[in-house]
Amino acid sequence: MNRRAFLTGFGAVLAAPLGVAAQQRGEVPRVGYISPGSSSDPFRQRRFEAFSQGLRELGYVEGRNVIVESRWAEGEYARYPVLAADLVRLKVAAIVTVGGAATKAAREVTSTIPIVMSVVIDPVGSGLVTNLAHPGGNLTGTSVMANDLITKQLELIKEVAPKGSRIAVLANPDNPSFRTGMSFVKATARSLGVELQLVEARNPQEIDRAFATMTREHAGAVIIWSDAIYGNQIKQIVGLAAQRRLPAIYATPENAEAGGLIVYSPNTRDLERRAATFVDKILKGAKAGDLPVEQPTKFDLVINLKTAKALGLTIPPSLLLRADQVIDP
């Protein structure tokens, strides 16, 4: 199969009853996929390919028994409602949404088409579902609990930069997971004797100003909150952290590949692959709201020793032994 044709075709969505009806009529069901990134971004394409691989493993062949319509937000939250509405207009059978903001936008434009969320932080605290075991409505998928992720990141960055008594948190206040997650990290900070500095940024210009603020207020390290916009600004954020000589911990594996110091995150490609399992069940007649939301089973700890050397940091041997991947100079 031509890979380019396969990736280009992947992305349309149908309401659940319509998807079942289409199958009964012999029509090929469509599945939508909304990504926060750009179709030209190799990191985002890698994740999308993981979802595509999941479908192939379940016996789906593009054009034969499924058509996927991909939609790319290009790092702009404002595009989500338009992309979701377009998929609803196409009467797709399910919509796969990457991230909380995309999921929220899709839920606001349809209450009938099944939505499969992927890599969403704390969907209960964000108000997307009321219960992980019985999500109800038209929403299910995979999630990451904010307290598990952000508190572990704080512990790790404190281990890497033990002299940092003030740690900044770079976050997008428009992210649905932001407010609930902050309550968890504040509790962990108190237990570690760390002062938190919350710095908000919604776009590239605000990211520049945020790092200037961190430096001015003497932050010793920074946690980069998981956010679609930040994922699209990997090079900018990694570059600013290096320029300001700030040890930083990230929530997506690609950041370490781009030069980020340390990453602790769920295995995002595994979560994308698992989203295909939900789509398969929905196409076979299951109701999204009856499918329990699943938690990640794989987490990645990645350390970039080249970046550590540039920052003059010595990574504790015990931490290196725990790492899933170490990027050597």
Image (cartoon, rainbow, N blue to C red):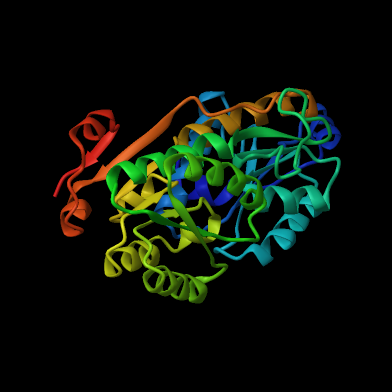
In this image, 276 relative to 124: left or right?
A: left
Q: Is residue 137 left or right of residue 115?
A: right
Please identify the quarter of the rendering in which residue 166 is found. Answer: bottom left
Residue 55 point in image, percent of width and height: 56, 31
Front position in the image: 99 or 170 = 170
Query: What residue is rendered at 58% in x and 41% in y?
Result: 184
- Tell me the residue at 13%/50% (across/down): 329
Res 11 seen here: no
Location of residue 16 with respect to 160 vertically, above or below: above
Q: Nearer the viewer, residue 173 or 6?
A: 173
Q: Is residue 76 left or right of residue 43?
A: right
Q: Position of residue 139 (x, y in %)?
A: 75, 36
Q: Is residue 234 above or below residue 63?
A: below
Snapshot quadrant of residue 307: bottom left
Residue 49 in percent (x, y) is at 47, 41
Residue drawn at x 78%, y 47% as measured from the top left: 107
The front one of 237 and 254 is 237
Q: Quadrant of residue 135?
A: top right
